[in-house]
Image (cartoon, rainbow, N blue to C red):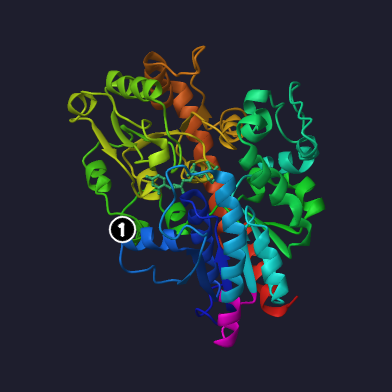
Amino acid sequence: MEVEKGRGGHVLVLPYPTQGHINPMLQFSRRLTHKGLRVTLVITIQNLQEMRASNPSDPAFLDIEHISDGFDDGLPVDFKLDTYVDSLKRVGSQTLDSLLTRLGAEGVRPLCVIYDSFLPWALDVAHAHGILGAAFHTQSIAINTLYLLHHDKFSDKKTDITTPISVPGMPILESSDLPSYMSEPELYPAYLKMVVLDQLSNMDQADFVLANSFDSLEGELSRELAKAFPLKMIGPAVPSVYLDNMIADDKGSDADLYKAVNCLGWLDERPVRSTVYVSFGSLVGMPKEQMEEIAWGLHASKRFFVWVVRTLPRHLEGRNLLPKGFSEATKDRGLVVSWCPQLEVLSHRAVACFWTHCGWNSTLEGLSLGVPMVAMPQWTDQLTNAKFVSDVWRVGMRPKADNRGIVGREEVERCLREAMEGETAAEMRRNAERWSELAKEALDEGGSSDRNINEFVATVCFRQV
Ligand code: UDX
């Protein structure tokens, strides 16, 4: 079902303002425009400035508006998440409210606000304007099920996650497999409040709950959430163009959204399935000792690699630093970049393996593009995602850490060997390719996610609050 842009009505899409949340909502927006909706992406002034600094022309398929998080000139050095989240809620609600009023006056009142489920206040603002609200889950069904079934353990601060958790449809989860807000709530009080408690506070009032997942992957698991909320799985949020043809050629890429980095040209020069792609997402700040072990492990493996090493904000100074001499030692085999078009890289013929932190987007992208993974989670939902990658979907392996929690260089080398050569590698690739087919089926016309998106669009267009 492809309809002329804008014929079906207007919706706002409001992500939590970090890359791992903007990306899937942007990809979902792209699908909505193919279904005939006019989409306006609403981001913070900071996000907007970053996007325009990377590329002065906005993406053509949607409109962009902004709200304020109260930090229009940038985040302070003494950044505190709880202060930020309070400000985002207070100033964000006011500026979203003004935006909806203005759009109404201009005759382009949206039919629905699709908001990141980390921003539950957006639902109240939408409903106050008589507009539908759709919560968008950027994390897995498994994670949200864990939060739903176990959130009461946190509300009275009597957390006791010492015994493994058993949830129908999931493997037994040891404490080390749980999202860090559950296993170590004292370390992350502000995240615990935002991600576990506040997120669920009004979700039962949402008109839709959209999840970035798909039926064959987490359909069985989705039953619990579907009892509580009007759930629709609409993922994976990966453009079909990548799923249709797993060899990257000209994809009309997303590079226009990010700083152009020519790692695709570099990959073109590498043999088929020769290269490991290493990335820990947009937020992870790796400590010095771990950076050294990964670096020298990559060097010792003698394999080609592309490694994304993020430049971090000032409050994370001292992390993500490459060891001295590494760049020189690996200049013939490796490329270190601060950002790359990940979907293109993962679907490039030269890439054999994805060394990932298992952020939900990276996990879904690796799985959907049929790339075997080495799963090295750092915090939040990544620990549970990694458990599913290795033990349930069987598309990846877990490196073993030493008693300091560090994955040593010999272990890096061993994992790369197993993930790129021999029977383990072949089996993981077979499994990954099977998941890739199922992801494509879900999104193809008439597939489970495609039908869910059609139902969502049809309901939004014909129903008001
Ligand atoms: C975080 C959480 O880890 C994740 O689980 C949650 O759902 C969203 O917030 P992040 O750590 O950034 O996200 O990881 P991930 O979910 O993998 O998202 C990163 C996104 O950035 C992916 O879509 C990936 O394709 C993209 N990316 C990353 C690039 O396009 N280029 C890069 O160089 C690195």
For label 1, the residue is 250
Residue 399 screen position, x and y as percent: 48, 21
Screen quadrant of the N terminus: bottom right
Q: Relative to 191, does residue 250 appear above or below in the rendering? A: below
| 131 relative position to 299: left or right | right
Residue 235 falls in image quadrant: bottom right
> Which residue lies at the image location 61% right of the left edge and 31% below the top edge?
187
Screen quadrant of the C terminus: bottom right
> Which residue lies at the image location 66% right of the left edge and 78% below the top edge?
461
Which residue is more in the foreground, 225 or 69? Answer: 69
Q: Residue most toward the top?
A: 403
Start and end of the magenta stretch? 99-111
Is residue 279 something that shows in the picture? no
Q: Callout 1, which amino acid? A: Asp
Which residue is more in the foreground, 423 or 115? Answer: 115
| 384 relative position to 425: left or right | right
Residue 442 falls in image quadrant: bottom right
Is residue 342 something that shows in the picture? yes
Task: Please count the marks in the image.
Answer: 1
Residue 31 screen position, x and y as percent: 52, 65
Which residue is more in the foreground, 5 or 347? Answer: 5
287 in magenta: no
Residue 101 screen position, x and y as percent: 60, 80
109 in magenta: yes
Residue 157 screen position, x and y as percent: 77, 33
> Which residue lies at the image location 31% right of the left edge and 58% below the top edge?
54
Question: Dot 1 lies on which element?
Answer: loop
| 186 relative position to 4: left or right | right
Which residue is more in the foreground, 283 or 209? Answer: 283
